[in-house]
Image (tube, rainbow, N blue to C red):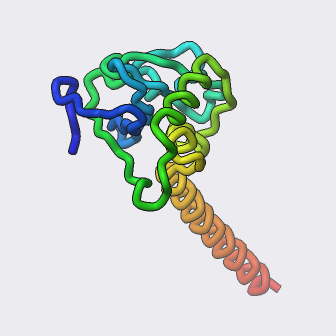
Amino acid sequence: MIYRKSDFIAKHGDLIEMSRKGGNSHWAVYIGDGDVVHLTPDGASGDESVQYSSSTKVAVIKREPLAEVTGSDPWQVNNRSDTRFKALPVDKIIKKAKQSIGRKVRYNVLKNCEHFVNALRYDIKISYQAKGANFAIDSNLIKALVCVGTFLTFLLRAESYRK
């Protein structure tokens, strides 16, 4: 279920998934008092976190109001991995999140904000978005290799006909 600001129902330690334009999601962990901890480009705040690109190399972990981070984008509580992994105790999730505030980390599109929040909640770095991106990259690579192979085969056959 997607929520707007007025429908607030997150509990401490819940993972918040924000639907961004373009089909991407941004993730944060709810720590109480209307605040979340999330990974965002260095120097950015709020819903600017959507502007990650392959050129973004440094990210910072911030505590910000959920309403500021979501902007006008819809969001939902998404603890989907609770069925696969045991969530850490809430006090440990919150402690880890608060201890990480202000830390700068290397950012990689395939190791992203979803990895970060899952590590806080489950102590496991996993991103379903990144897995999908890996699949897309892998399938595109396979297509490219098939095209190159087909082209090389064509060139070799054309060369053998000339002789």
Figure disc tally: 0
Q: As rendered, which of 56 and 6 lies closer to the eye?
A: 6
The answer to whether 34 is drawn above or below residue 90 in the figure is: above
The answer to whether 86 is drawn above or below residue 88 in the figure is: below
Q: As rendered, which of 35 and 40 lies closer to the eye?
A: 35
Q: As rendered, which of 155 and 138 lies closer to the eye?
A: 138
Image coordinates of residue 58 in percent, x first then y, are: 66, 25
Image coordinates of residue 7 in percent, x first then y, are: 17, 30
Q: As rendered, which of 2 and 131 lies closer to the eye?
A: 2
Task: Determine the image quadrant of residue 30.
Answer: top left
The answer to whether 67 appears left or right of 139 in the picture is left
Image quadrant in which the N terminus is located: top left
The answer to whether 22 is drawn above or below residue 142 in the figure is: above
Kindly identify the residue that appears in the image at 35 percent across and 17 percent down.
68
Image quadrant in which the C terminus is located: bottom right
The answer to whether 45 appears left or right of 80 in the picture is right
Kindly identify the residue that appears in the image at 34 percent across and 18 percent down.
33
The answer to whether 49 is drawn above or below residue 68 in the figure is: below
Kindly identify the residue that appears in the image at 35 percent across and 45 percent down.
78
**In the current view of this chain or complex, which residue is farthest to the left?**
6
Image coordinates of residue 133 in percent, x first then y, are: 52, 53
Kindly identify the residue that appears in the image at 43 percent across and 54 percent down.
81
Image coordinates of residue 50 in percent, x first then y, are: 44, 29
